[in-house]
Image (cartoon, helix red, strand yellow):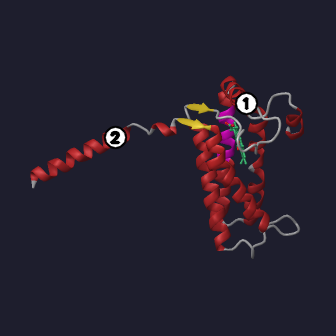
């Protein structure tokens, strides 16, 4: 009996040792993977759900925001928060470069090396944009949890601000015509 407990204790000590060291994947974030696998699909889903449920006055319709729509909105907002925090907290931010094979990226985006150089020149600014997105996603999670129609509608629209903010500083080629067109005015 005691021998058995001793083995369990050893096993426990071993597993707790292993969990002390955080997995390496959380320390390095690949910007393109974060966008393609996490941030973009979550944001697109959020905008689809809220656009579908929007009435003529631009407010969310309580009938169209049924149980399923609220649950999906919350789930995607949570995913958006997780991925943007991962970008904000990563020790190493690695640019992957535009999708040259799929050719689905807009004109005027920078090369992988240029994106990396822009991030390395001001990583704190990059993390601040990522944190801003995480905070906005968190407010959307709260609005979806309390089923606050007005807040959910406005929060969903406003997550676009850090997307634009970060892209103009860290994704588009500086000085490009396309950048002038997307740069937030004012
Ligand atoms: C903290 C900075 C940051 C924020 C915030 C951000 N992005 Fe990005 N995004 C980038 C960078 C950098 C790239 C270029 C990635 C690369 O090529 O390595 C990118 C690329 C993309 C791409 C192109 C991916 C491809 O196919 O190459 C999409 C789509 C995208 N972002 C969507 C979004 C949306 C939607 C939001 C807001 C909900 C957002 N991003 C917020 C930094 C950001």
Residue visible at 26% across and 43% down? Answer: 13
The image position of residue 58, as x and y in percent, is 85, 64
Residue 186 in view in this figure: no
- Left or right of 178? Residue 92 is left
In the displayed structure, would residue 75 be above or below residue 132? below
- Whether residue 127 is in magenta: the answer is yes
Which residue in the structure is indicated by mark 1? 111
Q: Secondary structure at mark 1?
A: loop
Residue visible at 67% across and 67% down? Answer: 147
Q: Earlier in the sequence, mark 1 or mark 2?
A: 2
Residue visible at 44% across and 39% down? Answer: 23
Residue 156 in view in this figure: yes
Q: Residue furthest bottom?
A: 63
How far apart, in angstroms, are the residues tagged by discs 1 and 2?
39 Å
- Left or right of 136? Residue 28 is left
Q: Secondary structure at mark 2?
A: helix
Ligand 1 is located in which of the four quadrants?
top right
Residue 77 is tagged as none
Which residue in the structure is indicated by mark 2? 18
Quadrant for the N terminus in the image: bottom left
- Whether residue 76 is in magenta: the answer is no
For the record, the magenta segment spans: 126-135
Provide the major secondary structure of the magenta segment.
helix
Q: Nearer the viewer, residue 180 or 161?
A: 180
**Mark whose residue sits in front, 1 or 2:** 1
The image position of residue 29, as x and y in percent, is 57, 37
Quadrant for the C terminus in the image: top right
In the displayed structure, would residue 10 be above or below residue 112? below
């Amino acid at each position: 009996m005691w021998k058995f407990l001793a083995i369990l204790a050893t096993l426990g000590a071993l597993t707790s040792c292993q969990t002390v060291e955080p997995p390496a994947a959380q320390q390095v974030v690949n910007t393109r993977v974060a966008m393609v696998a996490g941030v973009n699909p979550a944001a697109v889903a959020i905008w689809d759900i809220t656009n579908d449920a929007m009435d003529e006055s631009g407010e969310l319709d309580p009938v169209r925001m049924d149980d399923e729509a609220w649950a999906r909105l919350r789930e995607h907002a949570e995913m958006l928060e997780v991925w943007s925090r991962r970008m904000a907290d990563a020790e190493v931010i690695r640019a992957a470069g535009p999708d040259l094979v799929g050719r689905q990226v807009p004109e005027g985006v920078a090369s992988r090396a240029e994106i990396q150089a822009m991030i390395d020149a001001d990583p704190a600014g990059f993390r601040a944009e990522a944190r801003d997105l995480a905070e906005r996603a968190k407010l959307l999670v709260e609005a979806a949890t309390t089923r606050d129609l007005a807040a959910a509608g406005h929060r969903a629209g406003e997550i676009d601000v850090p997307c634009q903010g970060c892209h103009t500083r860290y994704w588009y080629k500086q000085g490009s015509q396309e950048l002038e067109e997307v740069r937030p005015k004012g």
